[in-house]
Amino acid sequence: MNWRIASNPWIMILAVVVSGGVVSIWLAPSSPENQARPLIDFPAESTNESKGTGTQSARGYLGPQACAECHLPIFQSFAKTGHAAASSVARPEELQKSLPSNPHRVVLTPDSINVDLEIRPEGAFQTAVATSGQSRFEHTERFDIVIGSGKMGHTFMFWKGPRLYQLPVGYVSITNEWCYSPGFPKERASFSRPIDARCLECHITFAQVAADDPYSFDRDSLIYGVSCESCHGPGQRHVEYHKSNPDSASAQFVINPAKTSRERQIDVCSLCHAGGGVKDLRTNAFSFCPGDPLENHLRTKTVDKITVMGPHSNDQFLRLSQSRCFTESDRLVCTTCHNPHSFERNNTAHFSKRCQTCHSAEACGKSSELGTLIRDNCVDCHMRKAGMELHEMGFFSEGTASGATLMRDHWIRVPKNANDGDHSLFAILAPQARERLKQLQIEFALDSAGEVQRLHWPAGLPTQELVLLRTFSKLQDLDLSGQSLDQAAWDIVLQLKQVRRLGLSKTRLSDRHIKQLTRLIRLRHLDVSACPQVTDESIADLESFVVLESVDLRETSVSSAGIERLRINRPGCNIRH
């Protein structure tokens, strides 16, 4: 047992309670007013050495390396995907990369409980440290298995005999932080959460489960990652047949989901992406085979139970099933948009092209406003990302950083109102707009938050691309000198309410345009030099600017009298003429 007493046990331990295979350590209260409470619990040493003699033992799973022998390009591409990384053996050298220090302490309760993460020569470990007065108790378990692709983070498991348990501290990618995992009791360090076969079924390809205990596994049987056989079925008969019949051109004893019905294709994904936990199993975990009706294996959630998105992706099919794209089509399946053999995460342009196999960009109601931008990003408007704060998901530690993880909503729909997407539409498209600026070789500068703050639009570029500017909500310094602005381009300029410095030198500017520029209520610096159509008629409008601090009127038709009038009525304004 990996625990030790660091002081006089008669002083420290009030009780050691063993119940249901779980050991709970109760520490004596450090002061009379504090009540005794269990600060650490962990599984008792198991005597069950079952090797999993259930029906799964003859299923014929081989692992993805067996597929690589004949399908190497597909295997190499798939190995980069999130499904391939859904689980793995814990490697200390990889864990070390995300630890701020070695050891690194996660504080659960400042007065009594911490968890230390440490890389040692013999492996990586989590050690819970509980203190009460001068007493101290420690319990240590090894990082054995990593769960999660890393998109959101990782959780970790350890072996205790043939059983798996979840370690209390996990890693959150979005904040680069180690903290207590969701669902654990906040008042103690718990090592007693067992992992059942249904939980494991959605993170690994196969595990041989004990016939009499859904919490016991044969360690050597685990096939990590959600890999080839998760979608194509056990590969042993397929491999044996084709090694014996190398000239056979027709794949035997393997399922190609694309050649099954729409329902059976969706079932393969719905095993893990349509809800349904251990209480919903109708057969044993790991007994579902692609091509079988999922309803015979698992009772999935219904649409009325999915009102909000959760931290898992187990609601994605149910969200999708509410979409008109799904209900009005008899062909749309998960792989219409997702290629399970390729890493495509965050490639919005790539996914948007798949939208446009059915929908034209010109048919979008925002096409006239967004121009070319709309071709590269359908999904951020019609499949919004929903943010969940870490504390809402159940992650916590003393001083947990504020942060939200974003999950893509698979309910495809048109935003109904401004708050549902239209209001932030241009901000949504900002990443694509920045990439477009680079393609056009347009000079721009970013602020400390990575937002476009300053931009020079070179003469000669098509002004229809000016729609890009509407996506940059923090743009303050804009130089459009030398441009020939048509009415559509000018209308875009007038919508940039956040701009503080505007360069319009050598543009076809007139007194009418100066009057319209008064709408830019934050404008402080204006350059209209070399615009001969600007005359004394603009003086009254220049006087009415809210916060104008400087104006360049060189090579305009403004007279000396007009300059003097402006100087008198706008004292403090720097006037170049």
Image (cartoon, rainbow, N blue to C red):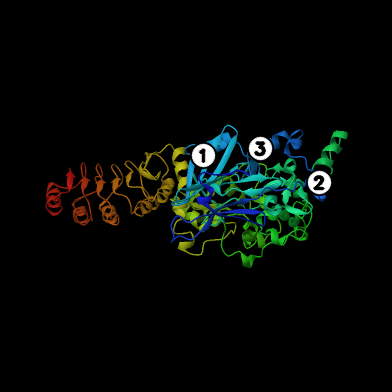
Q: Quadrant of the N terminus?
A: top right
Within 10 Å of the Cα at label 1, are there few (<14), some (14-19), or many (20+) other Cα atoms? some
Helix or strand or loop: what does disc 2 sit on? helix
Local crowd at mark 3 within 10 Å, few (<14), some, or many (≥20)? Answer: some
* Residue 97 visible within the image: yes
Residue type indicated by callout 3:
Ser
Q: Are marks 1 and 3 in contact (CB under 8 Å)?
A: no
For the residues bearing labels 2 and 1, Cβ distance under 8 angstroms: no
Residue in front for this viewpoint, 236 or 537 = 236
Measured Cα–Cα span from mark 1 to mark 3: 26 Å
Marks 2 and 1, how far apart at CA: 37 Å
Q: Which mark is residue 57?
A: 2
> Sequence-wise, which precedes: disc 2 or disc 3?
2
Q: Nearer the viewer, residue 534 or 298?
A: 298
The residue at the point 73 percent across, 53 percent down is 214
Q: Amino acid at mark 2?
A: Ser
- Secondary structure state at the residue bearing disc 1: loop
Q: Nearer the viewer, residue 24 or 557?
A: 24
Residue 98, label in figure = 1
User: Residue pushed farthest right?
Assistant: 244
> What is the x, y in percent for residue 522?
28, 53
Question: Counting other residues with Cα less than 10 Å from the Cα at mark 2, is it few (<14), some (14-19), or many (20 or more)?
Answer: some
Which residue, given by chain and number where applicable, does mark 3 sit on? 77
**Inter-mark Cα distance, 2 to 3:** 29 Å
- In this rendering, which labeled residue sits more in front, label 2 or label 3? 2
Give x and y (percent) for residue 142.
60, 41
Query: Taking 316 as reference, is 459 left or right?
Result: left
